[in-house]
Amino acid sequence: MKEFVVRFFGVGFMSWIVVSCGQGGGPVPAPAPAPSIEIPSGEFQEKVRGAATAGNRSGDGPITRNRIDHVRNAPAPKRARKGLATGWGDEVKSSVNYTGFTRASSKPVGGVDVIHYNDEEGAKAMGAIEGRRRSGLQSAGNGLVSWGVKGRWRKLRTHFWKRGRIVVGKKGQKYSLVVRNNARSRVETVLSVDGLDVIDGKPASVRKRGYIVDSGKTLEVKGFRTSEEAVAAFEFSSVPNSYANLRHNDTRNVGVMGLAV
């Protein structure tokens, strides 16, 4: 489906998503026929358009295919941290529109929900119980949404873990985040991967704005947004070659996907 986003600036936080529901405690937004993003005028409009920089810091040069490929293809350090992270994949068409949305609360409904991921070896090292696989989708936001991780054709294999669940992937595999709206109203979903907001590629925060999902609809987020028309695909990579490491030199939150409603 076509994605739509409502955005505003916020302070960096750990990996997570924020979904705001238009029920109780605030104005309920009118139904929107299709996902979209409202573009305000003036300075705020420039901040929204700036999302297409996909995480460039002040003073950084533009992200180019050659620069990313050069680092991705370089040999990993001998003492590189093991396990999976998320890299900057190929450009994928994924258009976005704008719409108005009023949050019912400044806090995410049901708190922040997370999904951990790793390769097979890493999942076992983390204590995942082999053979005890869980459903591909998990409930979040007090049941307002269900979400999970999808490979090319189906939900990725998920293992039971004492701290929730671990999705098992393979290096080089592309994936997407799937969010299904179970509520009767639209919800706002703020998603993060490896501690980075999926819309601007910068440190995630529950104060940032996110994608809007209509009642009964499913949103599929395929990568970090690079423009209003495309994203850089989520692709499992080594930790040194992860987007979090290449652009922010920070791997503290790799292996964690976040969602808030």
Image (cartoon, helix red, strand yellow):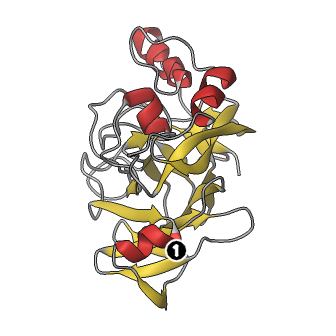
Outermost residue on the bottom side: it is: 131
State the image coordinates of residue 117 (x, y, percent, origin top left): 45, 63
Q: What element carries label 1?
A: strand
Crowdedness of circle 1 by 10 Å Cα count: few (<14), some, many (20+)? some
* 90 or 50: nearer the viewer: 90
Viewer can see residue 148: yes
Horizontal side, residue 104 vs residue 62: left or right: left
Please name whichever residue, 220 or 36, is drawn nearer the observer in this view of the structure. 220
9 relative to 151 in the view: left or right: left
In this rendering, the answer to whether 32 lies above or below 228 is: below
Instruction: Give the residue displayed 35% in from the left and 46% down from the top.
Output: 27
Q: Tell me residue 203's x, y (percent).
A: 35, 35
Q: Is residue 133 above or below residue 225?
A: below
Viewer-proximal residue among 80 and 224 = 80
Percent position of residue 106, x then y: 25, 45
Residue 111 versus residue 164 in the image, above or below = above
- What residue appears at the point 49 percent right and 37 percent down from the top-left corner? 243
Q: Name the residue under label 1.
A: 137
Q: How many labels does the image show?
A: 1
Farthest-out residue, front: 78
258 and 103: which is toward the camera: 258
Residue name at image x 41 percent, y 47 percent: 194
Tell whether 252 sits left or right of 233: left
Residue 143 can be seen, yes or no: no
Q: Which image quarter is the C terminus in?
A: bottom left
Residue 33: image location, x then y, percent: 67, 47
- What kind of residue is marked 1? Leu
The residue located at (36%, 44%) in the rendering is 195
